[in-house]
Image (spheres, rainbow, N blue to C red):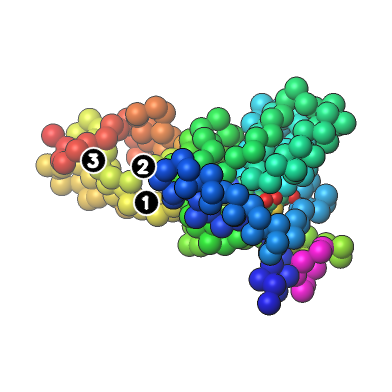
Amino acid sequence: MNRWFDRPGAGQVLRDGTRRAGRAAALALCLGAAVAAAQDEVPFVTTPDAVTLAMLELAAVGARDHVVDLGSGDGRIVITAARRFGASGLGVELVAELVRTSRERAAAAGVEGRVEFREQDLFRTDLAAATVVTMYLLPEVNLQLRPRLLALAPGTRIVSHDWDLGDWTPDRTVTIDVPEKAVGHDKLSRVHLWVVPARVHGLWCGDGASLEIVQRFQRFSATLARPGSDAPAAVFDGRISGTTLRSDGVHAIGLRLDGATLRLLGNAMVPAQSFVRARDACP
Ligand SMILES: C[S@@+](CC[C@H](N)C(=O)[O-])C[C@H]1O[C@@H](n2cnc3c(N)ncnc32)[C@H](O)[C@@H]1O
């Protein structure tokens, strides 16, 4: 059975056993084997052009973005991000031949000054400079990457062709008809977008007030209390998008993480106030 073609919309991926190898010699051996295995077992499959555009549009890529494609194949996503949207970019790819092709394509497109292609394991790639991360990998690889994606700067956009991130549900998903799609049975592509949420879980203290936040990916539930007063605690649930938290409902409450300060924006019901993280309890 060819796992690639039997999976609806599956993408080419190399197993990443190499990244766990501790020693350099073992790493080099494993890497060579992994490349050979990938070329032997899984054909190179590209994201169709219409899907590439949909991915970049869904992430609202612009000239100030730095797009990192993990497993960049022939470089099309990064090159399109630079050529059509003015972004800079990095593509990392294990197959040397594809890295060479990507550099040639970048030069032909006139964007070689704004993009870089590295022969590198995506699990060893520093993602700190990315404002947008793109992927066309496999579900289990996405899940292995998930802790690193969640640790990126709040507001970083992540776009994945076809595969999701398990129970970290996407902020948006679009489905595209792709009659020419080389893999899968339904000739559809799904493009998922996540905006990395600020990490706000825990206890925050303000002037005479405490804010206890329970966070699960982009969802939060916050309990605002005034210790020592008779005022009842207010509980509000909502979503986090980057550094902005907004409660559901008519009297929406907004919060914004500003460096180390969490600012409650306030409304007719709740006064504006600032909070900082607490270790144990609020004074
Ligand atoms: C399905 S292709 C996607 C190519 C390109 N991103 C696109 O969407 O057209 C996946 C690519 O990831 C590369 N790849 C797989 N595992 C990798 C790893 N651990 N590090 C870097 N590249 C990897 C494969 O060689 C392949 O070119």
Name the spot of residue 108 as percent of width and height, x first. 87, 31
Task: Give the mark, 2 or 3, whose residue is nearer the N terminus.
Answer: 2
| Labelled pair 3, 1 in contact (Cβ < 8 Å) | no
Residue labelled with disc 1: 215
Task: Give the mark, 1 or 2, whose residue is nearer the N terminus.
Answer: 2
Q: Which residue: 66% across, 26% down?
A: 64
Disc 2 marks a residue whose amino acid type is Val
Name the spot of residue 200 as percent of width and height, x first. 36, 42
Q: Which residue: 64% across, 45% down?
A: 94
141 in relation to 204, above or below: below
Q: For ligand 1, tell me if the residue under mark 3 lies within 8 Å.
A: no
Indicate the secondary structure of the residue bearing disc 3. strand
Indicate the secondary structure of the residue bearing disc 1. strand
Q: CA distance from mark 1 to mark 2?
A: 7 Å
Disc 1 marks a residue whose amino acid type is Gln
Q: For ligand 1, tell me if the residue under mark 1 lies within 8 Å.
A: no
Disc 3 marks a residue whose amino acid type is Ser
Indicate the secondary structure of the residue bearing disc 2. loop
Task: Specify start and end residues of the magenta stretch as a single range.
Answer: 181-187
Left/right placement of residue 28 relative to residue 182 reads: left
Does residue 183 show up magenta in the picture?
Answer: yes
Foreground tag (3 vs 1): 1
| Labelled pair 1, 2 in contact (Cβ < 8 Å) | yes
Left/right placement of residue 49 relative to residue 134 reads: right
